[in-house]
Image (cartoon, grey):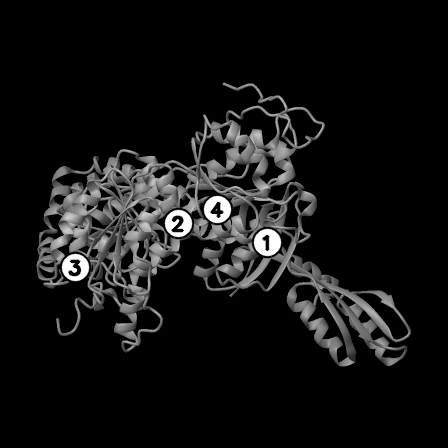
Amino acid sequence: MIAPPLIKKLVASQPAPAPAEGPTGAEILVDALVSEGVDTIFGYPGGAVLHIYDELWRARDRITHYLVRHEQGAVHMAEGYARASGRVGAVLVTSGPGATNAVTGIANAYMDSTPIVVITGQVPKHLIGTDAFQEVDTVGITRPCVKHNYLVREASDIAGIVREAFHLARSGRPGPVVIDIPKDVTAARSSYSRLDHVGFPFSTGVSPLDRTSLASALDAVLSARRPVLYVGGGIANAGADELLRTFAETFSLPVAPTLMGLGGFPSAHPLCLGMLGMHGTYAANMAVAECDLLIAVGVRFDDRVTGKLATFAPHARVIHIDIDPANIGKNVAPSLSIAADARHALSELLSLSRRENKQQMQGSVDARQHWWEQIRRWQRSQPLRFSGAPNQIKPQSVIRELHRLTNGEAIITTDVGQHQMWVAQFYPFNRPRQLITSGGLGTMGFGLPAAVGAQLAFPDQLVVAVVGDGGFQMTNQELATAVQYGLPVKILIMNNGYLGMVRQWQEMFYNRTYSEVDISVAPDFVKLAEAFGAVGLRAERPDQLHDVLAAALAHKGVVVVDVVISKEENVFPIVPAGASSSDMILQSEGV
Amino acid sequence: MRHTLSIIVADQPGELSRIVGLFSARGFNIETLSVGETLDPRWSRITIVTRGDDRTIHQIVKQCERLARVREVHDVTTRPHIEREMALITVQASAGVARQEVLSLVSVFRAKVVDISHTQLIVEASGNKEKVDTFIELLRPIGITDITRTGHIAINRLAAGEERNEDEYLLRQGCEA
């Protein structure tokens, strides 16, 4: 149904409109957002977006705006919201510094394929190019880290651009889209009616899968003696977790998820080998090093997964399934590829397999007995482990305790670094969209705002941001946002007084030269939490850990838990950068 | 190996920089570039000459195809094709032997004199890269003071049957260097 055009009476305080009839650009924008299903937007006002904010205030029963404390936080919140819910996140920021502050968040969403639409204000058209106040070339700055961006020139273009932006953000390989709107365009009037179905002259439809490739892929799966399924963020994005499970179970395939793939396959499942890559499990990395068939689904052969490319899965035929054709052959040349989303490809493979002879299929599964025995030996010989210490809280034990107290059900967000890897290793995720982490860009400060966004998407679920003391200090001002809107996120600071991952590399690869990683001069995080109107708790000794965590999780409001962990704990296993994944270092010398 | 890519992109502001930016961001190299309208004025054709092994070229093509406003990308080099570029060359040649030498080269290369003064000539030459390179090399000892070269443009040859062998045709004209 086409809604009537929005024609509103002039409000006295509004600036003089152009003489044309119809709603203003700001009114069109807000209505177009509503028609895309946006009911939540994260943002920060400024001069160039005043008309839009004026309209948003009138539309506050249709769209709830969440006022952040820094634009980077707005974009991370939108990403947390989008990744938890599967919907498109929406952001509104002003021109100049508003836009540049948002860039880190946009780049993060680009690397992790998260659908968000970021609306940035721009100086009026006649001032563009004059170095006007708060002018920056937003379209130019964001160009390399968006799926697409727009500079809106006419109010009459807004509706079509918003429709296409949301379509682009969520279709294919999802990602961020930026709409830059000059201030005068938001004041100009234009005729407007809601768009029903818009054909996009530029986008390409889903092409049918190549039957020959599917058949060859199935043959390869059936004839492989030592297969491994390597799965990533594409599983959650395509909603393919159930199909993946059926696929793995049908063919008895060991599954090695990437960091972004955690939860896309249940970690507790007997077929799951644990995370693959630089800090992955011994079994997962060895299985890939020895496999004869690597079935890569929804992944991009990131360097943190592959290590040295020449020795990655050296004995394997590679089947690569990914929605983004540019990912195929980018780092590893597969012997077979299917450019499709994981859901489409896996469902086609499964339906093809139903035509196979049951006995033959059982035969091929049985032939993998030796392979599974080998994998079980790897798992038994080198499980993830850590040594206890009587007077220090071990970070791994914090994550284990968190897992126990949350029954493994919490939505967890993280920054980047050691704490992120401990979460990946010691919090087994069993459902997609449960772990929201900065994977590709590795953004410190992502966890707290992402948790706020995820909490908004799921108000009744427990959302815990596990962060480092470094990352926390990059975006902790968003505590105010969480408190203002009563979003009861729990922030768990893994506080070792160091930029821990950098310190670990300096210890292992730079002769223990701890160059500029000591951040032990820091605010008292308990007092800081209290200053924001949140609850602050601290655990310093192992015997306090359980009670403090339990109290934090039981509290109904925002809680910051400062967990003082052993200072020089390292993440193991580790595959040194550029080394072969089978050359992983399993634990510290002398331990 | 050298490849000539033909990229059909919406004729909208900023689309050229999107493509050029993609090349620099991903470490691909651009040897020459030219942009012009296509038969349908809503679309432009960007012709880029680049170098790389097959995998790099595939990657460039796919990365370009990801762009929302790119309709199609062809590697013209994979099929028989015709390439052209143009050069405007200012040559130091007063009346006399030097000028005669320039004029005879102009004739052999089917180039054109487009401007002349007492001491200099501007000549216009077009052809594939090798021809233009050779022409410039032969003029160089006479004294070139300035050169402006366009980027490459390229088009695939007509299908067999209607195909006219251009090299043979040109050979009969006796002019192609």
Q: Is residue A500 left or right of residue B47?
A: left
Secondary structure at numbered mark 1: helix
- Name the residue located 11 percent from the left edge and 53 percent from the top edge: A372
Q: Which of the marked residues, 3 or 4, is nearer the chain's N terminus?
A: 4
User: What residue type is disc 3 on?
Assistant: Ile
Q: Amino acid at mark 1?
A: Ser
Q: CA distance from mark 1 to mark 2?
A: 37 Å
Q: Secondary structure at mark 4?
A: loop
Locate residue A464, reporting x and y percent. Answer: 26, 45
Q: Amino acid at mark 4?
A: Lys
Return the residue at label 2.
A477
From what the image shows, is residue A61 above or below residue A150?
above
Distance Cα–Cα, label 3 vs label 4: 43 Å
User: Could you tell me which secondary element the residue under label 2 belongs to?
Assistant: helix
Tell me the residue that label 3 is attached to: A393
Q: Which is in the foreground here, disc 1 or disc 2?
A: 2
- Expressed as whole percent of the image width and height from the top left, the position of residue A33 reads 49, 31
Viewer can see residue A230: yes
The reply to whether callout 3 and callout 4 are in contact (CB within 8 Å) is no
> How far is mark 4 from mark 1, CA to CA?
14 Å
**Is residue B43 or residue A377 the one in the foreground?**
A377
- Residue placed under numbered mark 1 in the picture: B17
Q: Which of labels 4 and 2 is toward the front? A: 2
